[in-house]
């Protein structure tokens, strides 16, 4: 059955999407021009949204997202079981590594950050909750891509060239697939200055009962402080935490990415069975 789209509701959602993308205050004229809306319609919809607190207005008649958007977004995040289940494990991980922790999911072929704990290194960049990033140049994104069939990865990457935000970004799709196969083999992803020139991340996926990647976690630090001792610590703690959360989500495997992931911290793979106990 075809659903009739309500024009006013559609325009209100377009305004929210516009302001979210622009990340700045816009005038009524700028909103109407960007969305090709009639002046009278723009006025009525925007001020209705201000009244309902989905938008806020400055003294000089400019508009941006309001408190209600934040509340709705937080309610959505709170409903995600993976956030609720993962949060106490990530708290424990943060205490053990004292670096910045991220939890992210894939949405519309991008990484979306849904939980963050700031650590001692304070590697925050622009990765605020709800913000998006590329998948091919982030540890979180590559951890997720490695859990997908190659055909799905191809669909996510699309036909456009891979962007290069940092010195070590992989821009060749052939090289990226080679990296994904290595991630599947060892059980975790590495972002070695691929998204930012002084960043270093270790990431691992969270799998569902159906052995599908639901999300990914990472520890982010500065490249210049990484030595072999820290690297080994991050690998061990991220992978064992990801497996512990996966098991809480119903995953029954002993190793991330299946039996082909021996793990680098201990080549016999025994680290994957050493998961943190359930918090509380």
Image (spheres, rainbow, N blue to C red):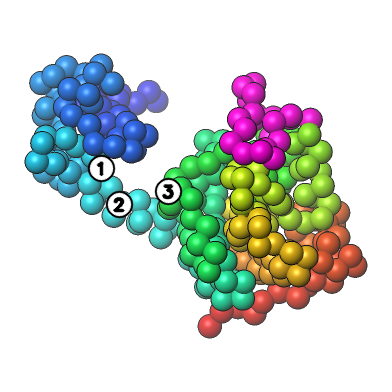
Q: Determine which quarter of the picture holds residue 194.
A: top right
Magenta residues span 153-174
Q: Which residue is mark 2?
A: 70
Residue 130: mark? 3
- SS at circle 2: helix
Q: Secondary structure at mark 1?
A: strand
- Whole-percent x, y for residue 125 in the image: 48, 50
Graded by Cα atoms within 10 Å as few (under 14), some (14 to 19) or many (20 or more), the crowding at tag 3 reads: some
Magenta residues: mostly which secondary structure? loop
The residue under the point 52% across, 67% down is: 119
Disc 2 and disc 3: Cα gap in Å? 10 Å
Residue 64: image location, x then y, percent = 23, 39
User: What residue would you read off at disc 1?
Assistant: 65
In depth, the one of 246 and 265 nearer the eye is 265
Q: Residue at x 28, y 21 (%)?
A: 34
Q: Is residue 161 above or below residue 149?
A: above
Q: Are marks 2 and 1 in contact (CB under 8 Å)?
A: yes
Q: Specify whether residue 237 is painted magenta.
A: no
């Amino acid at each position: 059955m075809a659903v009739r789209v309500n024009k006013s509701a559609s325009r209100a959602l377009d305004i929210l999407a516009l302001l979210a993308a622009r990340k700045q205050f816009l005038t009524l004229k700028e909103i109407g021009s960007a969305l090709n809306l009639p002046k009278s319609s723009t006025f009525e919809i925007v001020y209705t949204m201000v009244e309902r607190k989905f938008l806020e207005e400055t003294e000089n008649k400019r508009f941006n997202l309001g408190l209600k958007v934040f509340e709705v977004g937080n309610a959505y995040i709170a409903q995600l079981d993976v956030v609720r289940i993962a949060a106490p494990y990530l708290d424990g991980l943060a205490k053990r590594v004292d670096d910045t922790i991220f939890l992210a999911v894939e949405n519309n072929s991008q990484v979306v950050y849904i939980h963050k704990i700031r650590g001692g290194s304070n590697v925050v960049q622009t990765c605020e909750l709800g913000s998006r990033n590329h998948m091919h140049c982030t540890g979180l994104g590559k951890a997720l891509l490695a859990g997908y069939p190659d055909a799905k990865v191809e669909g996510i990457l699309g036909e456009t060239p891979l962007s290069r935000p940092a010195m070590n970004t992989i821009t060749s799709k052939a090289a990226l697939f080679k990296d994904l196969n290595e991630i599947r083999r060892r059980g975790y992803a590495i972002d070695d200055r691929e998204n930012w020139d002084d960043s270093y991340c270790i990431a691992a996926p969270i799998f569902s009962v159906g052995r599908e990647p639901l999300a990914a976690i990472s520890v982010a630090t500065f490249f210049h402080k990484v030595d072999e001792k820290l690297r080994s610590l991050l690998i061990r703690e991220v992978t064992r935490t990801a497996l512990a959360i996966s098991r809480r989500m119903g995953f029954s495997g002993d190793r991330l990415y299946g039996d082909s992931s021996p793990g680098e911290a201990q080549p016999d793979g025994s680290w994957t069975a050493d998961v943190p106990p359930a918090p509380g």
